[in-house]
Image (cartoon, helix red, strand yellow):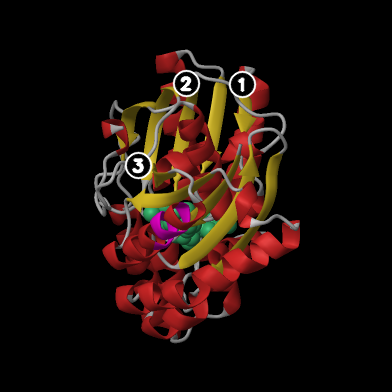
Amino acid sequence: MIVLGIESSCDDTGVALYSSEHGLLAHQVHAQNAIHAPYGGVVPELASRDHIRVALPLIHELLASTGLSPKAIQGVAYTKGPGLAGSLLVGSLLARSLAYAWGCPSIGVHHLEGHLLAPMLENPQPSFPFLGLLVSGGHTLIIAVKALGEYEILGETLDDAVGEAFDKTAKLLGLGYPGGAKLAELAKLFVAPVSGAPALNFPRPMTDRPGLDFSFSGLKTHVAVEFKKQTALLGELPESHKIAIAHAFETAAVDTLLIKIKRALAQTGYTQLVISGGVSANIQLRTKIAELSQHHQICAYFPRFEFCTDNGAMIAYVGCQRLLRGEQDGLDLTIHPRWPLNSL
Ligand SMILES: Nc1ncnc2c1ncn2[C@@H]1O[C@H](COP(=O)(O)OP(=O)(O)OP(=O)(O)O)[C@@H](O)[C@H]1O
Ligand SMILES: [Mg+2]
């Protein structure tokens, strides 16, 4: 079965073709960063308008790149939620229309299920059951993944998502929007504490009590207080000071994730760990998870870098699995801007 996947939950238009026989055939992502950067965050109306502008031409290009005709497509998958209502509507209406025109079924996919199962596009891939750590711009979840569609949330953030904390800290340091990846690049330049100053050590929130929930807004505030303190003393901060702050923030955020993951592995007894979502591209996180997997005989799986953030491939993959199980859309047309993963 060959499935076209369309992702349009936020500010990336992703399209992909996935074959149940041959795996991923092709994919393309159009990012809208340049449109939203001047506003310091995503402007929903501009996001939906840009999805309308680029989605269909992107699908034409995708088909042309594989030499496939629409007749070869046996299903159309799209992101049904959670996400921005306008953006979701553009993708779902386009997907439903194409499926109708091509005479094939369509299927609405949960965006987070897409992220969670993105490592299934790699080789080797995990097998059910496994522990999932989903770390993205909007979510921080520890999930017991028992089977396709069987997800038990073991822990989640009580306030900011970890990706959001990366973005807000990056903004504070003047790195622009979205700044998570840029903050990680800056943190990589760290070699030693600023000469004469004590090493920065930000708190690892909620690790001093039992449980698997997270809270990142306090960490973000800690960084802001330190930044203001240093700025009051020095004025515009030299690069070395920004690097030290970026590194201390990244280390605190990554250590917090590690502490909770170790707990969750001990609690569940799972020996496979899947890390996905935009923050799974973080090199310090990947390095520390690699160390953890060596010491604890755990197999860790990540998506390839381009599939950490939003993409159509993960939607095409999940859509294909669900269509193969006999699921498909009915005649009603709904999107779910809010949609808990454990309600699937
Ligand atoms: N190397 C990196 N280190 C840390 N964070 C990163 C890195 N690369 C990307 N991110 C963060 O990943 C996030 C984007 O990920 P993703 O596209 O999965 O989130 P989203 O789609 O906005 O949110 P959600 O999937 O929860 O709706 C941003 O917050 C970004 O800062
Ligand atoms: Mg996402």
Tell me the residue at 29%/55% (across/down): 217
Q: Residue 261 at x, y = what percent? A: 46, 30
Q: Earlier in the sequence, mark 1 or mark 3?
A: 1
Identity, as a three-letter code, of the amino acid under mark 1: Ile
Q: Earlier in the sequence, mark 2 or mark 1?
A: 2
Residue topped by disc 3: 329
Identity, as a three-letter code, of the amino acid under mark 2: Leu
Question: Does 240 appear above or below 284?
Answer: below
Residue topped by disc 1: 298
Q: Residue 126 at x, y = what percent? A: 60, 26
Q: Could you tell me if residue 248 is visible in this image? A: no
Q: Is residue 64 left or right of residue 134?
A: right
> For the magenta stretch, what is the residue range?
94-99
Magenta stretch: includes residue 96:
yes
Residue topped by disc 2: 265
Q: Is there CB contact under 8 Å for labels 2 and 1?
A: yes
Question: Does 250 appear above or below 237?
Answer: above
